[in-house]
Amino acid sequence: MNPEISPKELRQLIRNKEWTIPTSGAARGCVQANLVMLPQDEAFNFLLFCVRNPKPCPILDVLEPGQVEPAIAPGADLRNDLPRYRIFVNGQFKTESEDVADIFNDDMVSFLLGCSFSFENAMMAAGLPIRNIEESKNVSMYVTSRPCKPAGPFSAPLVVTMRPMTPEQAVRAVQITTRFHLTHGAPVHMGSPAEIGIKDLNRPGFGDSVTIRDGEIPVFWACGVTSQLAVTSTPLSLVITHAPGYMFVSDLVDEDLTIL
Amino acid sequence: MNPEISPKELRQLIRNKEWTIPTSGAARGCVQANLVMLPQDEAFNFLLFCVRNPKPCPILDVLEPGQVEPAIAPGADLRNDLPRYRIFVNGQFKTESEDVADIFNDDMVSFLLGCSFSFENAMMAAGLPIRNIEESKNVSMYVTSRPCKPAGPFSAPLVVTMRPMTPEQAVRAVQITTRFHLTHGAPVHMGSPAEIGIKDLNRPGFGDSVTIRDGEIPVFWACGVTSQLAVTSTPLSLVITHAPGYMFVSDLVDEDLTIL
């Protein structure tokens, strides 16, 4: 963990509106999470969606209705401790906000889902290239032709991130990310993008395109954006998520999430 | 998989009441599962209990309310395809039954949870001793002093199984069972039973006691019986489970459950 700021200190800065930028690289070594809040009527079905699709939607924590203090970050308040939220009403994106204390209510259930920052740290420690970080860009994300398993009213295509590497590096990347099954785990595909419905690697659905060098192949991991497509796939009265890149920073350290 | 009988054939025999004995060793190599059925009102909380306690309660499949055909066994019917069920009314054990077609209703949600048969096969293939199988006994199970994480009205102490082995064998057993994270995964404890609240290894809470030889240590794994204690920890109007040893046999093969 980066000693310069603890996750608790970071969350306090965010709560005081003194930290209003993305959380990438902050409190490095601590687990960051995707946030989804939705009405308890549909909480079972959304939890089921996550359970059925553990690679894009790995569950780090689920709170009881109305609760805002996650077990993985004692003292935190999910209504204030992320720097930016997105609010959806009746299935439509409404606005972004720096806190949701005024609209969160006792009927809502909060989900924290793993994100790929944890395994990126581990891959970098092993000397593997993370091209988007090398090029100071957002990771390339693509909507694939592979459907997730639906649950109740929730459905979504699998969204993937892509990192280019040599085949030898890809082997090592499989080994390293396998350990991190709660932050998307091993790749879901590598090589031919067409096979998973990606027509042009230079035109990602979200994020930026990155350089693919001679001799490199695209390696694809399941992506947490899948959960955002799923939760907005049906018109719920109110849904709150983090804004992309503005994650929840927990007290867990990356190694807490490893299977072995 | 044992070629003499397929899981589909086994389920048909069971449905015809032509197979009324425990399922241990049947359709060997196929994944067997614990069954829990409960009213949908509490399905979210019970799913949450399982998610929060993945080692004792690893989720293989959860069905929508009223559904009886699991994704992991197309064509199966959970109301008839287990040889014996246990029925609980208002939290009290009521009776055992050979099918539950008459009492299952559209309001109920079914959970299939991993069981330790899968990793026992893998350990035996590696030459490790499974003492209870060697001695033709039921595995030794103990209620520990470690509480599971509660969820809604559900709580339970962690229940463990115990298999004695040498320290060297225990190291190998950790490696092998780590791969099977959906059937309880790596041990939760080894060595001192007192540390997890077990006073006398010769007096298990469930199952039989087995011989512990000189130089062997007890190795403890999380046990699916935990889920049965949890689901009966609050007086639900109706709960159905499998009877101990009379499991649901799915179409999955053990290797489908491995993380690596």
Image (cartoon, coloured by chain):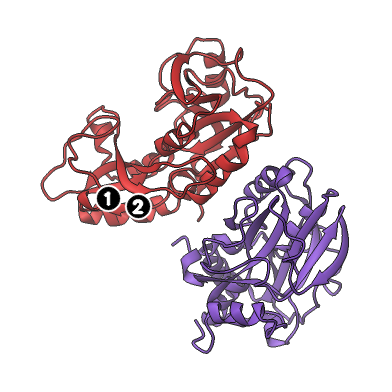
Chain colours: A purple, B red
Quick one: quadrant of the C terminus of chain A?
A: bottom left
Percent x, y for residue B68? 65, 26
Amino acid on which the number 2 mark rests in the picture: Val
Percent x, y for residue B184? 43, 46
Q: Can residue B236 be seen in this view?
A: yes
**B172 shown above or below A34:** above
**A229 shown above or below A10:** above
Task: Tell me the mark number nearer the camera, choosing from 2 and 1.
Answer: 1
Comparing A199 with B149, the one in front is B149
Residue at the farthest left position: B214
- Chain for mark 1? B
Rendered residue at 51%/67% (across/down): A74
Q: Is residue A149 visible?
A: no
Percent x, y for residue A194? 81, 61
Where disc 1 sits, the SS reads helix
Comparing B158 with B82, the one in front is B158
Residue B65 quadrant? top right
Residue at the farthest bottom position: A4
Comparing A90 with A114, the one in front is A90
**B232 shown above or below A199:** above
Q: Are marks 2 and 1 in contact (CB under 8 Å)?
A: yes
Rendered residue at 87%/62% (across/down): A93
Residue B188 numbered mark, or none: 2
- Chain for mark 2? B
Judge left or right: residue A171 versus residue A14.
left
Residue B196 numbered mark, or none: 1
Where disc 2 sits, the SS reads loop
Amino acid on which the number 1 mark rests in the picture: Ile
Residue B37 quadrant? top right
How far is mark 2 from mark 1, CA to CA? 10 Å
Percent x, y for residue B62? 61, 37
